[in-house]
């Protein structure tokens, strides 16, 4: 079994899939990591699936699965539950910032954290996305703080974690699509998983595949559902410690 699983949901990514995967795998190999790359295809209608099949035939460290519908959260959940590594990193195909790996993995290996979240809003971060998207991130995380007592600064950045600690949390999540990542981090915090944040410099390879205003209503509906579920069935685990913030650099 590999030591590290890198889990990446992919949807309509034919244009950037091959170069992004090859660059990532080259970087992982150059670091001497024993890894697998697990691509989680979800409802693509372009040539993404065919490109994944070609890559998997060429690269034995690449595995893939498909959930059959365009659902980021469902794909990510299946990827986490299907990962074989002791350590897991959940990434985005348009990011793949290896500097996050370089800083997050030592925190996990040393026992300093069990879940590391890359944050676009932590002190020292640089979010180079358009202003309206930065504002949406602020609004989303402010809402999570008000409704759930979330004490971090971001839930949607890349994540690195101990599989045995966080995969069971993923199995208990109830919402999908864009809010799955938030539920995963909120539940982990509520269940006492030791969290740390790493500030990111965020540069995307391409605009998001789904526009912000199209996503907003479904995000709000799923946040409302999550609030209702957690209100009716609050975690019985002891309160989590305050989220630690790793220094920039």
Image (cartoon, grey):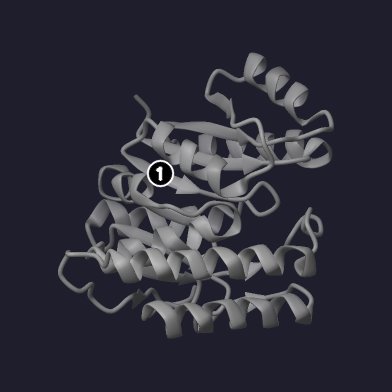
Q: Is residue 143 above or below residue 113?
A: below
Residue 146: horizontal and vertical position, in percent? 44, 85
Q: In this orientation, which residue lies closer to the viewer: 216 or 247?
A: 216
Residue 152: horizontal and vertical position, in percent? 41, 77
Residue 64: horizontal and vertical position, in percent? 57, 26
Q: Is residue 33 above or below residue 194?
A: above
Determine if residue 233 is in view: yes
The crowd level at tag 1 (other Cα within 10 Å; few <14, some 14-19, many 20+) is many
Asked where in the image residue 137 lies, by quadrant, the reply is bottom right
Q: Going by the picture, which residue comes out furthest to the top?
A: 57
To which residue does mark 1 refer? 88
Determine if residue 195 is in view: no
Which of the image's four quarters has the N terminus? top left
Residue 243: horizontal and vertical position, in percent? 33, 76
- State the SS at label 1: strand
Tell me: 201 left or right of 164: right
Q: Is residue 234 above or below residue 208?
A: below
Q: Is residue 142 above or below residue 54?
A: below
Tell me: 188 left or right of 34: left
Q: How many marks?
A: 1
Asked where in the image residue 20 lies, by quadrant, the reply is top right
Residue at image point 77% right, 58% down: 208
Residue at image point 38% right, 63% down: 229
Residue at image point 76% right, 68% down: 212
Residue at image point 43% right, 71% down: 227
Q: In this orientation, which residue lies closer to the viewer: 1 or 165?
A: 165
């Amino acid at each position: 079994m590999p030591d590290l699983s890198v889990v990446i949901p992919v949807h309509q990514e034919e244009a950037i899939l091959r170069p992004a995967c090859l660059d990532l795998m080259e970087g992982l190999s150059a670091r001497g990591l024993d890894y697998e790359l697990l691509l989680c295809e979800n409802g693509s209608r372009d040539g993404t699936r065919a490109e994944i099949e070609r890559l998997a035939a060429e690269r034995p460290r690449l595995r893939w699965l498909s959930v059959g519908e365009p659902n980021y959260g469902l794909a990510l959940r299946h990827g986490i539950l299907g990962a074989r590594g002791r350590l897991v990193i959940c990434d985005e195909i348009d990011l793949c910032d290896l500097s996050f790996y370089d800083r997050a993995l030592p925190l996990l290996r040393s026992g300093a954290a069990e879940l590391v979240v890359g944050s676009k809003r932590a002190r020292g971060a640089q979010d180079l996305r358009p202003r309206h998207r930065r504002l949406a991130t602020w609004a989303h995380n402010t809402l999570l703080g008000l409704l759930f007592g979330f004490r971090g600064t971001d839930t949607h950045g890349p994540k690195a974690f101990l599989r045995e600690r966080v995969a069971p949390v993923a199995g208990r999540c109830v919402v999908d699509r864009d809010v799955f990542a938030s539920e995963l981090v909120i539940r982990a915090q509520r269940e006492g998983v030791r969290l740390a944040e790493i500030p990111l410099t965020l540069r995307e390879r391409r605009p998001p595949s789904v526009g912000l205003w199209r996503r907003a209503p479904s995000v709000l509906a799923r946040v409302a559902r999550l609030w209702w579920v957690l209100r009716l069935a609050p975690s019985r685990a002891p309160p989590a410690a305050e989220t630690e913030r790793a220094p920039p650099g």
